[in-house]
Amino acid sequence: MHVVMIGGSDAGISAALRARELDPAAEVTVILEDAYPNFSICGIPYYVSGEVTHWRNLAHRTIGDLEAAGMRLRLDTVARRIDVPGRKLLVSSAGGEEEVLGYDKLVVGTGAVPVRPPIGGLAGPGALGSTDGVHLLHSMGDTFAVMDTLEQTAPASAVIVGGGYIGLEMADAMTVRGLAVTQMEQLPEVLPTVDAELGALVHAELAARGVEVLAGTAVQAISTAAPGAAGRLEVAATGPGGAAVTRLADMVLVVVGVRPESTLAADAGATLGVRGAIAVDPGMRTGLPDVFAAGDCVITHHRLLGVTYLPLGTTAHKQGRVAGQNALGGDRAFAGSLGTQVVKIFDHAAARTGLRDHEARAAGFDPVTVGSAADDHKAYYPGSHRIAMRFTGDRATGRLLGVQLFGHKEAEIAKRIDIAATAIFHGMTVEALSDLDLSYTPPLGSPWDAVQMGAQAWTRHIS
Ligand SMILES: Cc1cc2nc3c(=O)[nH]c(=O)nc-3n(C[C@H](O)[C@H](O)[C@H](O)COP(=O)(O)OP(=O)(O)OC[C@H]3O[C@@H](n4cnc5c(N)ncnc54)[C@H](O)[C@@H]3O)c2cc1C
């Protein structure tokens, strides 16, 4: 049995590890277009900030570890064409030599590529790029380009286009590096994946750390600044009310989301779904014989929404594992995402799981969302922090649909959102979350944990 994975990141490597785990005799080959298999691109902001001191430290596993696990790595190799009936893959090396590889089962883990928005100066003849200090960010190659700009041109200032979670992490990282950062987000508030009430708290944290936050500001064009200007680049935008906004900066980072890299699979006949991602069943089967797919290149099965597109590393790992198992003849199903995520912004963290009010309404629920706040541990013990919470539940059934949290990074925001994620995963009601037997000691919690107090606030509100 020869299993070939295309893509050497979360999905491809998870599939390869699972296949080797289940059948140590299976021949497993991983094809990747760069030389950085199994790197944690989620950790890029912390390498840029200097908190992770060497890029090699971002590797989940070294090449030696992966080879010891029994997989053959084909670095700097691009998969060009899949011959589905012939079960063959055309690949080319960095030098341009082409080769045909046979496979018994194929797992496509081609991931996502950063969106290049229609901003003047980013496309077409004379487009600005990394040597001009204008960067997109997704791969290790992108990271090295950002580091070159930082180390060789010693920029004093940066504009970050995009106020999603990666934009926020990079605002944190660049500020830690000593740059003056301006963050531009076209929606009315930063971190638009949480309600504006919590986005405003994120905004306040950024501002308190010296980041200039321009929400409701759509970037129109990036150009080279005039000689002698206070920055090598000029960013022109339209602010609230249509006001013209201009900022000068030494570098610009454009981080406005990703799109699935699904062309290879589509060219082979795979069906595409939401946002052009590869359609797969919960077993990560593409519908093409012997071809599986997983990670940011595929649609996401969501436990409350059905099919959506929600590219996340946690999801890519789980889907890859399912694909690896099923490629060996297994019958696992991806249990479904809840879009659980957490982001650190300086000393704070914001997190969400499940649905927000408008998402729940669109999915056919009758949602009620209630905001509240509680201490992470007993306030009489030093170092307690307030946690801002938003609970969304279904009015008719009391079912818990979504939770959003914001608080100090020491307030266990990630673990508390995971309590909520577990409850939603298992279809619990808001009230049942309040009944859970959670741990308590005054320096670390309360007899009613903060999330249970949030649940009780919701129940009080609707009764
Ligand atoms: C800065 C940053 C921070 C992030 N932080 C988080 C986080 O905190 N939490 C979280 O859950 N997620 C996070 N993510 C998202 C997460 O990294 C992705 O969801 C995850 O990497 C997806 O894994 P993947 O294997 O599907 O795809 P990708 O990581 O996109 O990898 C795709 C792989 O396929 C290769 N490839 C593509 N086409 C070909 C081809 N034709 N031939 C050969 N190889 C090919 C690529 O080179 C690459 O190796 C972050 C992403 C970024 C960029």
Image: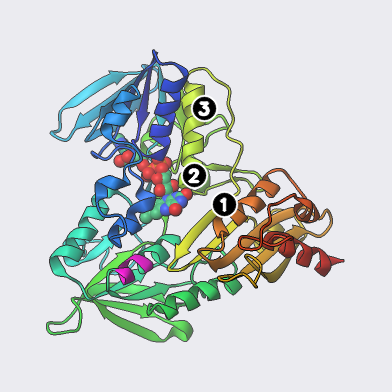
Queried on whether the Cβ of the residue with tag 1 lies below 8 angstroms from ligand 1, the answer reads no
Identified by mark 2, the residue type is: Thr
Q: Nearer the viewer, residue 229 or 342?
A: 342
Queried on whether the Cβ of the residue with tag 3 lies below 8 angstroms from ligand 1, the answer reads no
Mark 2: give few (<14), some (14-19) or many (20+) Cα within 10 Å.
some
Identify the secondary structure beneath mark 1.
loop
User: Which residue: 40% across, 24% down?
Assistant: 106
Image quadrant of residue 70? top left
Disc number lying in front (3 or 1): 1
Queried on whether the Cβ of the residue with tag 2 lies below 8 angstroms from ligand 1, the answer reads yes
| Residue on which disc 1 sits | 340
Identified by mark 3, the residue type is: Gly
Q: Mark 2 and mark 1 in contact (Cβ < 8 Å)?
A: yes
How many numbered circles does the render carry? Answer: 3
Q: Is residue 184 left or right of residue 57?
A: right
Expressed as whole percent of the image width and height from the top left, the position of residue 251 reads: 24, 70
> Of label 1 and label 2, which has the lower sequence position?
2
Q: Give the Cα separation between the discs numbered 3 and 2.
A: 24 Å
Expressed as whole percent of the image width and height from the top left, the position of residue 217 reads: 43, 77
Q: Quadrant of ligand 1?
A: top left
User: Which residue: 45% across, 40% down?
Assistant: 295
Identify the secondary structure beneath mark 2.
helix
Image quadrant of residue 229? bottom left
Q: Mark 2 and mark 3 in contact (Cβ < 8 Å)?
A: no
User: Which residue: 51% across, 42% down?
Assistant: 315
Magenta span has 419? Answer: no
| Residue on which disc 3 sits | 287
